[in-house]
Image (spheres, rainbow, N blue to C red):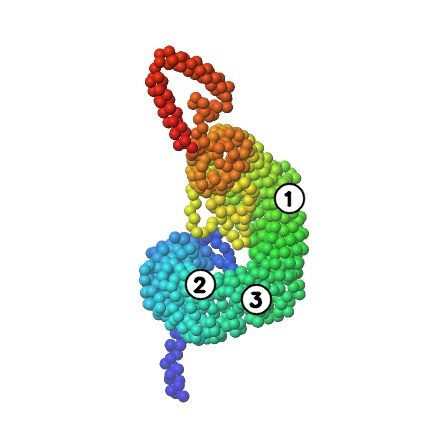
Amino acid sequence: MGHVNLVFFMIYPFLCQLAFSSSLPHLCPKDQALSLLQFKHMFTIDPNAPGYRFDITYHLIQSYPKTLSWNKSTDCCSWDGVHCDEMTGQVIELNLRFSKLQGKFHSNSSLFQLSNLKRLDLSYNDFSGSLISPKFGELSSLMHLDLLDSSFTGLIPEEISRLSKLQVLRISSDLYDLRFGPHNFKLLLKNLTQLRVLDLSDVSISSAIPLNFSSYLTNLELSYMQIYGILPESVFHLSNLETLYLSDNPQLTVRFPTTKWNSSASLMELDLYRVNFIGKIPESFSHLTSLRRLTIASCNLSGSIPKPLWNLTSIEKLDLGYNHLEGPISDFFTFGKLWWLSLGKNNFDGQLEFLSFNRSWAQLKLLDFSSNSLTGPIPSNVSGLQNLGSLSLSSNHLNGNIPSWIFSLPLLGLLDLRDNHFNGNILDFKSKSLFLVILKQNKLQGPIPKSLLNQKRLQFLVLSQNNLSGQIASTVCNLKTLQVLDLGSNNLEGTIPLCLGEMSELWALDLSNNSLSGTINTNFSIGTINTNFSIGNQLRVIKFDGNKLEGKVPQSLINCKNLEFLDLGNNELSDTFPKWLGTLPYLQILNLRSNKFYGPIKDSRSDKLFAQILIIDLSSNVFSGDLPVRLFENFEAMKVISENSGTREYVGAVYSPYYTNSMIVTTKGRDLELPQVLTTEIIIDFSMNRFEGHIPSIIGDLIGLRALNLSRNLLEGHIPMSLHQLSVLESLDLSSNKISGEIPHQLASLTSLEVLNLSHNHLVGCIPKGKQFEMFENSSYQGNDRLRGFPLSKDCGGDEGVPQAATPYGIDQEEEGDSTIISWQVVLMGYGCGLVIGLSIIYTMLSTQYPAWFSRMDVELEHKILTRMRRHKKRH
């Protein structure tokens, strides 16, 4: 007992010191607090950064500025995102994930003075244009480095491969702005032998995958890296591997082992979206007993579901979209643990009646059966999907009413039922979490439900191409987060709510093809609409076409600095040409067709008006005066021929899967609906007005033009020779004017021209000969009585469009019609004189008896006649 007391007495001071020290706050060193504050002041808080983002299950993750809590009056170990060592007070962890930081990350940042950092997370911030500093390689204690989606650019420095203690490395960027130098990727894998997690998604590597990987790897994510070659089979034999993401590497060939893998028992997630999949899914898949998430999408699979997949009864997430698979959709009932099922873009068929008796999908959060061949109605007695957050049944052949259980889903965030045959009314939604509702292209009726207009998170509301009726309630402006409002092609009436132009997040506003009335004039009296587009709005697309709107174009549109697409066509607007719209820096589409616009388009001294315009349609109005030469000079975007980059670009199509800004243009002799407007569609349509004067030769500088329509005006003069410069022109319509002269033979070089209409003018001469001109029919030239050549019945006696049939005594062809009487008088006078002279010659010959003289004259006359005949024959 005495020995015990002695030992206790000896260690008692140490225990007291330990207890005392643990009760004291461990203040972080002042130099580290100063370094953190200096780091904070290098950045601003991005006011436009979203306050939340959706994860793959459509749950919200909050984003907030953690550095706001940092100040000198408190210990830095208590600052948000900062973690210190409990014994020394040194800063060892810094987590600034989703902190809304914005600014340049300098290579000599004070952050690198925190030499004891073991964990550093800077993901999901905005360091646009910043390079990844080589000094990251000096943080030798780092075990966790996360730079995901923070907009770093340039080369990933070789020094990163010196962080030999790293267990977690995540680096990615958008649009391949980050890349490895030669052999650096191989060096990184060789040196970082302790890695557990490696995520280099979106980093451009453009090489084959090296063979050496850390044997400790549990997570390997190499998506969107432009990897090519064959995936080493050794990857499948990493015994600790739990997650393997290889998505969107179309040049990467994947061949699975035919026998059991070393990772068969551990692998839980496998993502093979858009890779080069060779052969069928092997039987070895049956051994993936731990597999929870499987994506084999866009891999060109066909036929029925491979048998090995049916053995994966532990599957929770299954994505087989964008293949050619077939069979009944109800077969997937056997997967009882699913929370995510995506089968879109296949050939599955059958009906959905199995949903009414399926109780095993109570945990299902996402269901995507879009773009298949499903038929029949959605069953009405479904009760087992109360956790569903996303439902997409678009582009099938479903019909009947949308059942009430869908509107009653409490957690519904995404509903996409477009392109079906649903009818009936849209009921009130129970969910308060809706952020996307797309019901377009059905047969839905009735008013827009009030519950849709009280959603705090709704971003996309697309109800177009239905039979909805009633008015647009002003409560629509309660949708503060709305980005797309598409109510086009319905039967809506009444006025446009005043507040729509003041919605700060809205970028697409489409109310086209309804029966809306009133004005959009900002200075109008009581009883009419007063739509005011506020300063700072985000609108890129405004479509009010196909309504009954009156008045003038509202001056407040000048506040829409991001506007790309403005369609006010087919209304009853009455105004002069709103040339002030030309100051909008991004305006590419302007459609004012079929209104009551009037007056001349006055030339402006500004050389910046409409610089980006691609389509301008002023047809079917009452514009007058000369065509605006200076306006054509300003069309800078039309002076370039768009190169075919292999990818289609659309005007205002940021969210093209959810919204397409279609428009109707008159081209190639017919009205054509463009479901989406390509940036290569360059069109001028000034037809059906009262323009007069000459066609400006400056139009020949607009070499990107695809269609030019100046028909049904009062234009005169000649067709400018400069039009032959429009090398990609596909449609030219100058019909029903007073244009005279010849058709320039240089137009034969327009090899892209598919439709030509020069009818009902005063054109003369020969039609040019050329490959394209051989395609055009009589209708292209009718109403021009003095045109000759193919395809007209009147023969043209020359080539290259130059008239060759000589008029008498050298009279020009253009003067021929006016001098017919004079020509005949000359002929008769010549005949009389010739007769007198001839008789005199005969009398002289007989009286003087000189037959040799007559013989020489006869020979010379014969020679001249033969020479002229040969020339005439040669021309023909």
Q: Nearer the viewer, residue 1 or 763?
A: 763
CA distance separating discs 1 and 3: 44 Å
The residue closer to the viewer here, 137 or 588, is 588
Q: Which label's residue is closer to the chain start, 2 or 1?
A: 2
Is residue 318 in sight in this rendering?
yes
| Residue at image coords 38%, 62% | 228
Q: Residue furthest top?
A: 847
Q: Name the N-terminal-most of marks 3 and 2.
A: 2
In the rendered image, the residue lying farthest to the bottom is 1
Residue at point 43%, 58% (across, down): 149
**Position in image of residue 528 (x %, y %):** 64, 39
Q: Secondary structure at mark 3?
A: strand
* Residue 702, x across and y down, in percent: 44, 38
Instruction: Single out the mark in the foreground, 2 or 1.
Output: 2
Give amino acid for label 1. Ser
Give the percent coordinates (x, y) of residue 359. 62, 70
Q: Quadrant of the N terminus?
A: bottom left
Q: Which residue is mark 3?
A: 327
Residue tagged 2: 275
- The mark lying in front, picked from 3 and 2, is 3
Residue at x-position 38% and y-position 76%: 14
Q: Residues within 10 Å of mark 1 (few under 14, many from 20)?
A: some
Residue 846 appears at what percent x and percent y?
A: 38, 13
Tell me the element at label 2. Answer: strand
Going by the numbered disc 3, the residue's amino acid type is: Gly
- Dot 1 corresponds to which residue? 515
Comparing labels 1 and 3, the label whose residue is closer to the camera? 3
Work out which quarter of the rendered image holds the C terminus and state it. Answer: top left
Residue 563, visible in the rendered structure: no
Q: Amino acid at mark 2?
A: Val
